[in-house]
Image: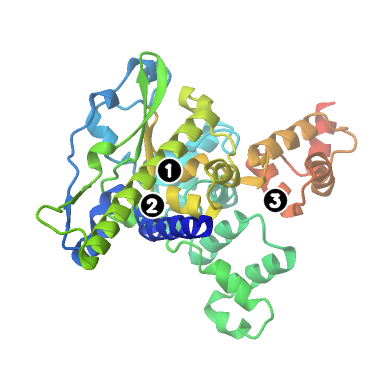
């Protein structure tokens, strides 16, 4: 008897899950389209579209407005993406330490003016920029190459090859041999087929296929309305989470005048109820994700940075597989006073489960700050110290990249600078 009950429960859950996964994966705007096949296959289901009214709770609130300069200015803004252009995004990133001086920032702004809509730098403007600032081509391109550390990665490159190299340097998990091979075939990209027999070719090709071409491709696409799934708002001075229920389609099961004992009818009604359960599971899952984001990223809503958050931990707390949670956050957005933010952005890049890139960079800067000025630390020494401190494995070029991001000279150059100061 117990075995039969267990099997029945498992079958019910499985049928609900079959409906649930595609519903969970879809964004809120496309839910009616995802539900359409279920409607077509079931004569007893009707789907009523959600309405587009905004709950009064999601109007701008003084609590968050005092914290963030980028607070939402009207309820309408809660329903649309922050329409920043490529150039606005780039302008906001021209700050120290990448651009430490007023002059380097002004040159960077001028470089932005010479970036085309695809994200490439128009090289024929180089001489004019050099003349304007009284600098040589070498200095200009030294500043331009710092754009390799900006988002979107690849922007500011002169051509496709350089854009790919910019993007390659942002991948930290590539082994040295594969990295060197990738550099070789990217630099000889027009003859890439000549490398097809090499042992690492397929691995290299998988990485290259992920590169953006052109680098600003997402800004070429026509901007579309984004509807957030989750709202984080102020309720009498406390942070609260709510789902965007108004946009959810309603599944109506019409059983009037039907004999529910008939096999066909009972099966279709069960399928309809499974669909309703699947929609509720979607809501419950996203609501829990919203609560956990607010709990873990509480300081973010007060204007601070996002902390590294593990997808694995979230999945365990929700009793789901990490791949299921990955589907749940894909293409979903949270709306708060700081703007409309992709859920995936709260899962900051981490080198290890508990170690964020920012922690590594901060420690590297501390090492350089307190190093022996007569024997400055080489990148290898910095790598060894960081690996020892955090118990992780990294490659030297990652340390070199981090050092350049903070405009820290190499060890031999630092030694000369220290000598001049003494």
For label 2, the crowd category at 10 Å Cα-Cα, with few meaning under 14, some 14 to 19 and many 20 or more, is many
Q: Residue, x 35% and y 58% (percent of image)? A: 19
Q: Secondary structure at mark 2?
A: helix
For label 3, the crowd category at 10 Å Cα-Cα, with few meaning under 14, some 14 to 19 and many 20 or more, is some
Q: Which mark sits nearer the N-terminus, 3 or 2?
A: 2
- Name the residue tied to disc 1: 285
The x, y position of residue 86, in whole percent, is: 38, 47
- Name the residue tied to disc 3: 398
Q: Residue, x 23% and y 24% (percent of image)? A: 56
Badges 2 and 1: C-beta atoms under 8 Å apart? yes
Q: Which of the pair 262/417 is nearer the observer?
A: 262
Q: Where is the C terminus found, in terms of image quarters?
A: top right
Q: Secondary structure at mark 3?
A: helix
Badges 3 and 2: C-beta atoms under 8 Å apart? no
Residue 25 quadrant: bottom left
Q: Which mark sits nearer the N-terminus, 3 or 1?
A: 1
Q: Which of the pair 343/3 is nearer the observer?
A: 3
- Name the residue tied to disc 2: 24
The x, y position of residue 166, in whole percent, is: 56, 57
* Side of 418 where 340 appears, left or right: left
């Amino acid at each position: 008897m117990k075995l039969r009950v267990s099997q029945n429960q498992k079958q019910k859950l499985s049928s609900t899950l079959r409906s649930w996964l595609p519903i969970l994966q879809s964004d809120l705007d496309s839910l009616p389209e995802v539900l359409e096949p279920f409607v077509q296959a079931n004569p007893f289901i009707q789907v009523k579209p959600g309405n587009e009214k905004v709950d009064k709770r999601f109007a701008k609130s003084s609590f968050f407005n005092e914290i963030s300069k980028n607070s939402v200015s009207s309820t309408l803004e809660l329903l649309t993406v922050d329409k920043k252009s490529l150039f606005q995004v780039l302008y906001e990133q021209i700050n120290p330490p990448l651009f430490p001086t007023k002059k380097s920032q002004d040159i960077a702004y001028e470089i932005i003016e010479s970036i085309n809509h695809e994200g490439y730098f128009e090289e024929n403007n180089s001489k004019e920029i050099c003349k304007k600032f009284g600098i040589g081509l070498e200095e200009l391109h030294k500043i331009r190459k710092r754009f390799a550390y900006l988002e979107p990665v690849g922007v500011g490159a002169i051509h496709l090859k350089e854009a790919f190299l910019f993007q390659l340097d942002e991948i930290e998990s590539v082994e040295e041999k594969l990295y060197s091979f990738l550099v070789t075939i990217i630099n000889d990209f027009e003859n890439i087929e000549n490398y097809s027999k090499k042992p690492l070719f397929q691995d290299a090709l998988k990485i290259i296929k992920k590169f953006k071409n052109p680098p600003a491709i997402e800004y070429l696409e026509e901007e579309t309305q984004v509807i957030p799934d989750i709202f984080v708002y102020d309720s009498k001075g406390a942070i609260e989470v709510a789902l965007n229920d108004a946009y959810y389609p309603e599944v109506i099961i019409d059983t009037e005048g039907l004999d529910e004992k008939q096999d066909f009818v009972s099966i279709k009604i069960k399928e309809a109820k499974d669909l309703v359960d699947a929609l509720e599971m979607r809501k419950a899952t996203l609501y829990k994700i919203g609560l956990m984001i607010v709990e873990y990223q509480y300081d973010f809503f007060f204007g601070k940075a996002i902390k590294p958050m593990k997808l694995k931990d979230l999945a365990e707390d929700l009793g789901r597989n990490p791949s299921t949670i990955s589907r749940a956050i894909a293409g979903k957005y949270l709306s708060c006073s700081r703007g409309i933010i992709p859920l995936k952005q709260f899962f900051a890049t981490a080198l290890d489960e508990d170690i964020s890139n920012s922690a590594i960079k901060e420690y590297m800067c501390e090492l350089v700050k307190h190093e022996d000025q007569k024997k400055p630390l080489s990148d290898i020494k910095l790598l060894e110290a960081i690996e020892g401190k955090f118990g992780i494995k990294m490659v030297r070029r990652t340390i070199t990249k981090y050092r350049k991001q903070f405009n820290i000279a190499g060890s031999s150059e630092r030694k000369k600078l220290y000598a001049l100061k003494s």
